[in-house]
Amino acid sequence: MNYTRHNLDDTIVALATPNGMGAIAIIRLSGKTAISIVNQTFKGKDLTQQPSHTIHFGFILNESGEVLDEVLVSLFFAPKSYTKENVAEVSCHGSPYITAQLLQLFIRKGARLAQPGEFTMRAFLHGQMDLSQAEAVADLIASDTQRAHAIALQQMRGGFSKDIATLRQQLIDFASLIELELDFSEEDVEFADRTALKNLVTSAQQLVNSLIQSFQLGNAIKNGINTVIAGRPNAGKSTLLNALLNEERAIVSPIAGTTRDTVEEVLQINGIAFRLIDTAGIRAAQDQIEAIGVAKTMQKIEQSAMVLYVFDIIQTSPADVASDIQQLFHNHTPFLLVANKMDLNPYTKMNHYTSSLAAVGLTISPQNFIPVAAAHQMNIEWLKSCIYQTAIQQDISSDTILTNTRHVEALQKAAESLTAITQGLNTGISSDFIAMDIRQALHHLGTVTGEVSTDDLLGNIFSRFCIGK
Amino acid sequence: MNYTRHNLDDTIVALATPNGMGAIAIIRLSGKTAISIVNQTFKGKDLTQQPSHTIHFGFILNESGEVLDEVLVSLFFAPKSYTKENVAEVSCHGSPYITAQLLQLFIRKGARLAQPGEFTMRAFLHGQMDLSQAEAVADLIASDTQRAHAIALQQMRGGFSKDIATLRQQLIDFASLIELELDFSEEDVEFADRTALKNLVTSAQQLVNSLIQSFQLGNAIKNGINTVIAGRPNAGKSTLLNALLNEERAIVSPIAGTTRDTVEEVLQINGIAFRLIDTAGIRAAQDQIEAIGVAKTMQKIEQSAMVLYVFDIIQTSPADVASDIQQLFHNHTPFLLVANKMDLNPYTKMNHYTSSLAAVGLTISPQNFIPVAAAHQMNIEWLKSCIYQTAIQQDISSDTILTNTRHVEALQKAAESLTAITQGLNTGISSDFIAMDIRQALHHLGTVTGEVSTDDLLGNIFSRFCIGK
């Protein structure tokens, strides 16, 4: 480990429960003097003489002997605690006044207010968990869908850490053997079996690549997918939004140009959050406000991961649709064609559009051309399943799904080093270069799990935690 | 006890910590099956076989065997718990998603979502605390000043309950003796010593009256004191508000009539919250908006507990001040005369105002006529001490201070019954009437501590609690 350890000698304290009034609030202390600090202020049993994992009723008194609250104190003696340090949790009445008083008292008695994530950082520094597990704690608290929750929990409980740790150990063994060869370089011996190394690197590449590939899904699960609903005025964009959400949110009116502000709503499909972004209609703007609205729409499309292009089969001819497609989609953002108001002309068929769209290079199919009647909830479930399929091109059944940008970046660098090792082995490059590439791969894999970390990295990671965790 | 007991046979569950994201959230269950319900979902030790007041690490699994969270479960076996029932507290990650999942799981397993205050109501119904102590729990959580907190804590720990309980017991003894006399009414014997009864009633009246008197202070401590700042335009009301709060809040400008909306700020003096209410200047309004402002000021004065009348010693003559006083103060709202801008004319003395104000019936003194220079913080501390003295005419050093309107009303009725007993004893009224008055007094005293209560009363009291308490 090449970071300077943070100060682990002092005792930290923080409110561990959310701010505000409630039945109970918890103040948590961790460090050598955590229990003795609470004990100094506690009227009841001698807390320092009690067993770990026990709860004690009593009173917290200030320096003047005034009772601040009736409390329950939970004791966890090192190393059997979250941080592996002595931990005391003071459960008091959930009053902001009382929690402020208790915090101030414990600080006067020698504790220091904890930084965000400092309890979890101590858990990491004391080897309770690796870095990717620690990061999962924050993800777990922030998770708001079933799948985000499942992935964070999986990662917190070890997830891919074990695979990476095994891989690192094998690479370390090879690196040692190769470095041993270097010591005997004049004798031209081979301690490290080149074929076994090639096989190891190949399986390492498979693991790393499958993790990298899982990130598309993982990121979608963690952060949701921005999905723009675009189309001409009165195509039924707001109605479609409502049909998808199955509620009345956007202001729906028959007057073209009603939706000027973009409206954001979240639609959940199979545990993935699609952030649906309604937009102003695309057309030559009638006034300045509308011009701004159209520009906003174009900007939103550029920033989105997916677009639902909605058109009115009565008002918009196949040629018009083709022209819109050509105008709107310069980049590779996936999009679906949603043919609205099918109830008004059930004789319109997908194949009426085939040639016009083929002319602008688009092959349509039942998966990207979806007839609906938004106002009547017709075919909305099929649309949802197409939205999901389009966004999540491969669904990964494994629990091991990357959700963290930092991890994916480290693994991409590790993959580059692994490729360099393979190339080196194939071209019979000198052992010292191979050893260097292995060290590089080890370094990048190590940053994922925290075997390699810096103060800056730790500061950056834990500052995103809430205080008290 | 004459209430129908609420259903105490089922197990209740609620989130006990404030809503929102945090490091830790706590879900609390209370009832016969509290521990066995958690145990059914818990992967770890058999919780039902563990000692009370211990903490256990493990996992909560749903019916499909999926881990919902890593948790710590704290166990409290009846009667050694807050409610005197079996209690389990599940400490999980502070994620709204997780707490919702756990609550739903425990409800599927047979728990019922608790009503607001239901844990504390069970504590009361099982004799853990009396009703006034239970009410103090909610006050304690809501307390936001040192004194409100001290009084709530005092009341929660017994406070005046013990005095009232002793008094009730003595009255019950007398009532029994008097009712015994009624059984022997034809023999004209006296079991109850009339002199001792008179003495008891006298000391009861002293206790009850001192409690009733403490309510003025108690109410001020609990709810704060509405204090209006009134005066002519440009007298310096906003500047005075800022000087008292020692910060820039109200918009101060040299243009008369700037302050049109009333601004509320809280000033703490000796632990009492004074809600300072700035007002529009009092004068013949120039336009409709100002007319509404002036009407609002008059209304605010009528609703306030105290007024600071501010005037500019340069612009406002003693006669004008007297005229304002006569116009503004029709009722008995206490007020202070704040003579502002003394720095501009240090030769003005209080005695210049004596005769004009005497003419409108006002005797001025250094306690109600306070020269200040608000813009320069001159004499603001003295003004604060006068504000406090005026609001809190008697400061009660005792810890026993009533803060609850329900208690003061019950004690007022008890006081009436005690007066009726005294009168009955003095006029030698028949014993059965005296017995009836004693029963009345007992009834009213009993409602304070909850020996007498109804479902409606309990519902009304506990519905003001937060959920989970």
Image: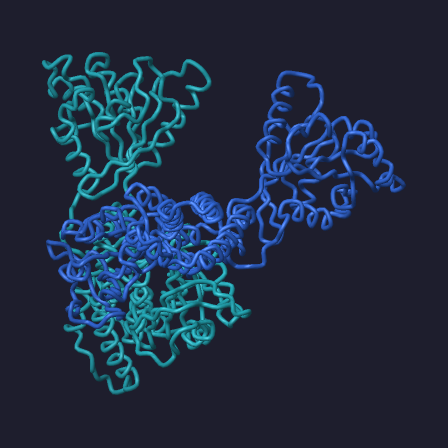
Chain colours: A cyan, B blue
- Classify B288 as above or below A58: above
Percent across and percent down for residue B370 are 77, 43
Percent across and percent down for residue B394 are 62, 51
Tell me what residue is drawn at x 68 percent, y 19 percent. B285
- Classify A85 as above or below B205: below
Res A132 quadrant in image: bottom left
User: Is residue B260 something one can see in this rendering?
Assistant: yes
Say how many tags the image has: 0
Viewer-closest of B187 and B40 = B187
Tell me what residue is drawn at x 39 percent, y 69 percent. A58
Horizontal side, residue A132 vs residue A102: left or right: left
Percent across and percent down for residue A216 are 24, 48
Res A120 quadrant in image: bottom left
Tell me what residue is drawn at x 21 percent, y 69 percent. A167
> Which quarter of the rendered picture does the C terminus of chain A lie within?
bottom left
> Which quarter of the rendered picture does the N terminus of chain A lie within?
bottom left
| Residue found at the far front of this picture | B187
- Classify B426 as above or below A198: above
Viewer-closest of B69 and A23 = A23
Horizontal side, residue A56 vs residue A348: left or right: right
Viewer-closest of A302 and A121 = A121
Percent across and percent down for residue B310 are 73, 35
| Residue found at the far right of this picture | B347
User: Is residue B95 something one can see in this rendering?
Assistant: no
